[in-house]
Every structure is written in structure tokens, then in C-alpha cells.
Amino acid sequence: MRRVLDLAVPALAACGVVVAIDQGSKALATSLVDRGDRVEVLPFLALENVRNKGVAFGLGGDISAVVIGATIVVLLGLLVYLAARSRTGWLIWLPAALLIGGALGNLADRARDGAVTDFIDLPLWPTFNLADVAIVAGVLLLLLDVERSGRGVE
């Protein structure tokens, strides 16, 4: 249990950093670009101030209350699962911090505004935010850890 706490405390701090960076970047983007507008920064990158009421990439339409409830249940389940695992190294807690911090950043938007603020626009890809980046990175790193664990690598 002591080992879990030794790793969970820095993970919670990392989670807080992810939320702060996400919320700060959204505030900056919305202060620079009016809602619904788009500003080209580079030929392959634009800032666009949009709201996403659905889930990933706007799928599902306006379902914020359902998404908020499901997010809370999934996050609590992930924390219980991680705390119960016999192997609790930083390769589990850091990706979890990314995933949870990103989910909390988007959850804060949903609770406050009823939608997630997205602002990074790349060609051929739906507009997204830094919380989405953290979530994807966390999931990929957790999957990598599961793959490593499946091959007996510790």
C-alpha cells in the first residue's frame, strides 16, 4: 500500500499539471480567437474556437449529462483497478495521470459550459485540444504497458 501511495501522489500532481495546462491553453485560445472563427498559424496548423457537445470528434450529439456521468464512473473504475494491481510502477501511474488529467480537463468544460472547447485544427483531422492529446497519450502508454506485461517484461 505504501508503494501505491508513493506513486499515486506524484501521479495526482501530474494529473493536476495536465488539467492546468489544458484549461490554460483553452483560455488562451479562446482569448485569441473569437468563437466560431479560425486563424491560420502555419500551413498545417490553425487555431479554431469551437465547442464539442458530443463525445470523441463530436459523435453522439448533445449528450453532456450522460458523458459526465460515464466519465466519472470510468475514472473511478480506473483508479480502483490501478490501486488493486500487484505491479504498480510509474509506467502505470504516469499514463493514468495523463488519461485522468485529460478527462478531468474536458469534464470541467462540460460541467461549466455544457461542451468541450476544442481549438487545435490540423488538416484532415477533427479539431481537438490538449486534454484530448493527454487522453490519447495515456491510453497508448497504458496499452504499451499491457503489451509489455503480456510478454513477461517487467
Image (cartoon, grey):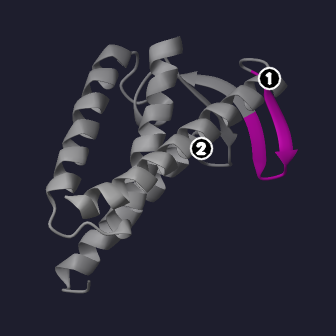
Label at residue 31 = 1
The residue depicted at 24 percent of the width and 60 percent of the height is 2
Residue type pointed to by label 1: Ser
Label at residue 87 = none
Horizontal side of 1 relative to 5 (left or right) equals left
63 or 17, which is in the foreground? 17
Q: In the image, residue 66 lies at what x, y percent?
A: 28, 19
Question: Around disc 1, counting alpha carbons within 10 Å, would you say few (fewer than 14), some (14 to 19), or many (20 or more)?
Answer: few
Find numbered disc 2 in the image and state the secondary structure of the residue it sits on: helix
Q: In the image, residue 106 lies at what x, y percent?
A: 48, 31
Horizontal side of 118 relative to 101 (left or right) equals right
Write down the region rendered in magenta: 37-47
The residue depicted at 31 percent of the width and 65 percent of the height is 143
Residue type pointed to by label 2: Leu
Q: The C terminus appears in which quarter of the rendering? A: bottom left
Tell me, yes or no, if residue 76 can be seen here.
yes
Q: In the image, residue 18 lies at what x, y percent?
A: 55, 44
Q: The N terminus appears in which quarter of the rendering? A: bottom left
The residue depicted at 76 percent of the width and 36 percent of the height is 47
Q: Which residue is mark 2?
A: 130
